Image (cartoon, grey):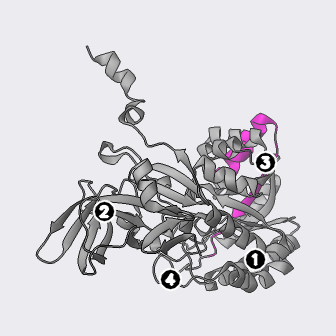
């Protein structure tokens, strides 16, 4: 559930009309509901409460500092995948022992920064990475705690671009490789292998792939312990799906009820890395109609938000609900594509939608864009990135101002001055 509700024909974000947000802050605009954000974090925290998990919010889903600060205030840890995300976690005051570091391409500089920060652990993806972490830790005279990311070769039954747990993917280690690497880790003086990690994909709406993966890792865990390895942490990753259209994902309670019986006997500290589940339905993208172009087969509603603002429809053919923020003056609906201003045929927010007749100035809301919306935005076509606001009851806070062209060109202007007249 979320707190974007239609009241008397008008869409509200908590207690604020979305039309007022558009008028005050302009469009394109990302608007987030604080109460939705916090309630979704509390749902997963409560569902797994008997295991007292460390819930590390996946920063890549939405990295706005205000979003991170709200979650940190609730006790969330952070799952990071870059040195920049480490800085963001530190900036909002997340305790280092609540930070885990994933990702296949960690640089020496990033590893050193994380070791100096004394994060909880690295999720290691390969043998070369393990050796690099050991080398950097030796230079810094530190011991690096690591979990090995296991690729259980399980089909997550999601889009192939966001499936990460099959043998064809670049992520993680096969179970036989992991056994060998745990043995190798024992020989490395600056490595302490303390856990196993998995992350089988994103937007997963069935519990079955998790059950399959946990069972496979449980067998590995038993073998490792029998071989003398001390494994204290089991990181189940993230990937819980949300409702974009007609999906029927499991609730946090139903999901926990299914997996907790498998997790309890493992005797490990549980780590979870949810991102989309927490923030996905806590945000909308607000956009204004610029033109309505009538075609022979259907109409094209051209809006001021494009694939640079929200790339998921273009990249994944993802479906997002689109609706007018105010009830249309006409009861008639038309078949249309909602498209942006970018010079690409793939620039669309929704295709073959039945929407009320629209005209210039009408405002639309693109639902469920809190995750991987602004986080994946770009300046393609030299477009300025959108503003972001956080709504809490009747209160609205601007949490990211709209970019200007001066912002966009700031890193290039020195070159212009150097070579210009």
Which quarter of the picture shows residue 195?
A: bottom right
Question: Which mark sits nearer the N-terminus, 1 or 4?
Answer: 1
CA gap, disc 1 and disc 4: 21 Å
Q: Quadrant of the C terminus?
A: top left
CA gap, disc 2 and disc 4: 29 Å
Residue 241: give x, y in percent of width and height: 57, 75
Judge whether residue 12 is colored magenta: no
The answer to whether 336 is drawn above or below residue 17 in the figure is below
CA gap, disc 2 and disc 1: 41 Å
Which of the labelled discs sits on residue 95, or is there none?
Answer: 3
Q: Which residues are magenta?
A: 129-152
Which of the labelled discs sits on residue 362, or is there none?
Answer: 2
- Asked if disc 2 and disc 3 are in contact, CB closer than 8 Å, the reply is no
User: Which of pointers 2 and 1 indicates the residue nearer the eye?
Assistant: 2
Residue at (78% x, 83% y) in the render: 262
Which quarter of the picture shows residue 166?
A: bottom right
The 10 Å Cα crowd at callout 3, few under 14, some 14 to 19, many 20 or more, is: some
The 10 Å Cα crowd at callout 2, few under 14, some 14 to 19, many 20 or more, is: some
Residue 411: give x, y in percent of width and height: 42, 30
Question: SS for tag 1?
Answer: helix
- Asked if disc 2 and disc 4 are in contact, CB closer than 8 Å, the reply is no
Q: Quadrant of the N terminus?
A: bottom right
Q: Is residue 122 visible?
A: no
Give the camera-side residue of 182 and 165: 165
Question: SS for tag 2?
Answer: loop
Residue under circle 4?
Answer: 247
Q: Is residue 145 left or right of residue 112?
A: right
Which of the labelled discs sits on residue 256, or is there none?
Answer: none
Question: Which mark sits nearer the N-terminus, 3 or 1?
Answer: 1
Residue at (29% x, 76% y) in the render: 356
Question: Which mark sits nearer the N-terminus, 2 or 1?
Answer: 1
Residue at (77% x, 56% y) in the render: 185
């Amino acid at each position: 559930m979320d707190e974007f509700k239609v009241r008397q024909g008008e869409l509200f974000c908590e207690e604020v009309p979305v039309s007022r947000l558009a008028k005050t802050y302009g469009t394109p605009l990302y608007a987030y509901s604080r109460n939705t954000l916090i309630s979704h974090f509390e749902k997963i925290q409560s569902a797994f409460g008997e295991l007292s998990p460390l819930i590390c919010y996946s920063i890549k889903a939405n990295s706005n500092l205000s979003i991170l600060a709200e979650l940190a205030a609730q006790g969330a840890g952070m799952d990071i995948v870059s040195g920049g995300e480490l800085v963001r976690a530190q900036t909002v005051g997340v305790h280092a022992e609540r930070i885990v570091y994933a990702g296949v391409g960690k640089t020496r500089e990033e590893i050193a920064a994380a070791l100096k920060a004394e994060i909880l652990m690295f999720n290691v993806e390969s043998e070369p990475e393990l050796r690099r972490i050991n080398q950097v830790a030796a230079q810094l005279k530190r011991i690096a705690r690591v979990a090995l990311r296991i690729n259980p070769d399980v089909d997550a039954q999601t889009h192939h671009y966001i499936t990460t747990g099959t043998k064809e993917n670049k992520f993680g280690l096969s179970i036989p490789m992991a056994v060998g690497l745990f043995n190798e880790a024992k020989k490395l003086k600056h490595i302490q292998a303390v856990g196993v990690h998995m992350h089988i994909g994103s937007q997963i709406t069935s519990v079955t792939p998790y059950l399959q993966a946990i069972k496979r890792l449980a067998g590995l865990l038993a073998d490792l312990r029998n071989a003398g390895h001390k494994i204290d942490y089991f990181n189940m990753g993230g990937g819980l799906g949300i409702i974009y259209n007609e999906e029927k994902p499991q609730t946090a309670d139903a999901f926990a009820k299914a997996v907790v019986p498998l997790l309890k006997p493992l005797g490990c500290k549980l780590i979870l890395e949810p991102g989309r589940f927490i923030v996905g339905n806590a945000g909308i993208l607000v956009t204004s109609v610029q033109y309505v172009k009538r075609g022979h087969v259907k109409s094209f509603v051209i809006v001021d938000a494009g694939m640079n603002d929200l790339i998921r429809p273009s990249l994944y053919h993802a479906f997002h609900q689109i609706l007018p923020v105010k009830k249309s003056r006409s009861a008639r609906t038309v078949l249309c594509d909602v498209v942006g201003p970018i010079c690409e045929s793939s620039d669309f927010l929704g295709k073959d939608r039945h929407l009320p007749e629209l005209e210039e100035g009408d405002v639309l809301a693109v639902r469920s864009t809190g995750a991987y919306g602004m986080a994946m935005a770009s300046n393609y076509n030299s477009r300025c990135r959108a503003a972001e606001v956080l709504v809490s009851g009747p209160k609205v806070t601007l949490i990211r101002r709209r970019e200007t062209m001066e912002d966009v060109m700031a890193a290039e202007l020195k070159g212009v001055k150097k070579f210009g007249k």
